[in-house]
Image: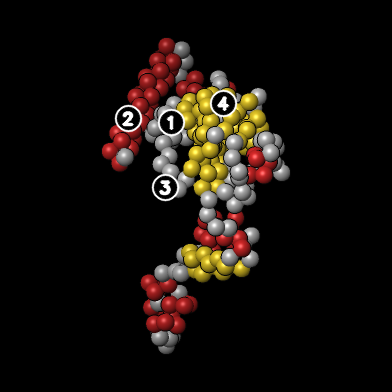
Amino acid sequence: MSARKQQLLKRHRRNKRIGLLVALLALLAVGLLVSPWLLPILLVALWVAHEAWFADHLFYSPGEDYRYRFAEGVESLPVRLADGRLRVDGELREGDTLVLGIGVRAGWLGRFLEPSVLLEGGAETDAQAFERGVNGLRYLNLTGLAGPLGEGRIRLRGRHCRLVGEPTLWRARHPDYRDRRVMVIAPHADDAELAAFGLYSQAREAWIVTLTAGEIETEHYRRMGLDGIAAARLG
């Protein structure tokens, strides 16, 4: 996997260099053959176009499939997509982790605007976005939608894209930690919130423990007469 990543990154950098060279040659040609006063305008236009459409920094092709390797114990369930509505054969529980694999193909607008798949039928409409120009297997997070999904109320609708191929639903079952005591250990409270807010905000009992590398900044407090432990707590 690491070798493939390096290969894709090398190809991405090569394409960037070729694109930059072509753009510079085109600008020089315009400046020499048309008018040098157009160069500043074209430079600004190219910068805006780059920031709007070409700044994704993808070093892989959006036409490739995602390749998820699910852990043992994750099972696939039969699922059908008929007239945009998902039909699942099998029992679903609220605590299930649900991931739907399906092909996503961008339309012509999806090459300039972010394509997304809308999930309708739940409490709120959810939009899950993908790369511009997407054309391959992608995964949708359906966790939390077990109820409406089991009742056949979930509809999928592509925005600037369309869904292709047969879907596959992956289900992972685990204990419902919301009914248990939860402790989140992080270097900072913001990190705990980013990583696990959805869990500890619903848990019956929750603690957040922050462990920082305060020992590297204890010299100032040691000069005030504190020992190492007390200085680390303040640092």
Neighbor class of circle 2 (other Cα within 10 Å; few <14, some 14-19, many 20+) is some
- The residue at which mark 4 appears reads as 163
- The residue at which mark 3 appears reads as 72
Q: Amino acid at mark 3?
A: Glu
Observer-nearest residue: 113 or 205? Answer: 205
- The residue at which mark 1 appears reads as 65
Q: Earlier in the sequence, mark 4 or mark 2?
A: 2
Look at the numbered disc 4 and give the secondary structure of its residue. Answer: strand
Q: Earlier in the sequence, mark 4 or mark 3?
A: 3
- The residue at which mark 2 appears reads as 11
The quarter in which the C terminus is drawn is bottom left
- The location of residue 110, given as percent across then percent down, is 55, 25
Q: Amino acid at mark 4?
A: Leu
Alpha carbon distance from label 4 to label 2: 29 Å
For the point 48% across and 25% down, the residue is 135
User: On screen, 58 above or below 27?
Assistant: below
Task: Give the label, 2 or 1, closer to the camera.
Answer: 1
Observer-nearest residue: 55 or 30? Answer: 55
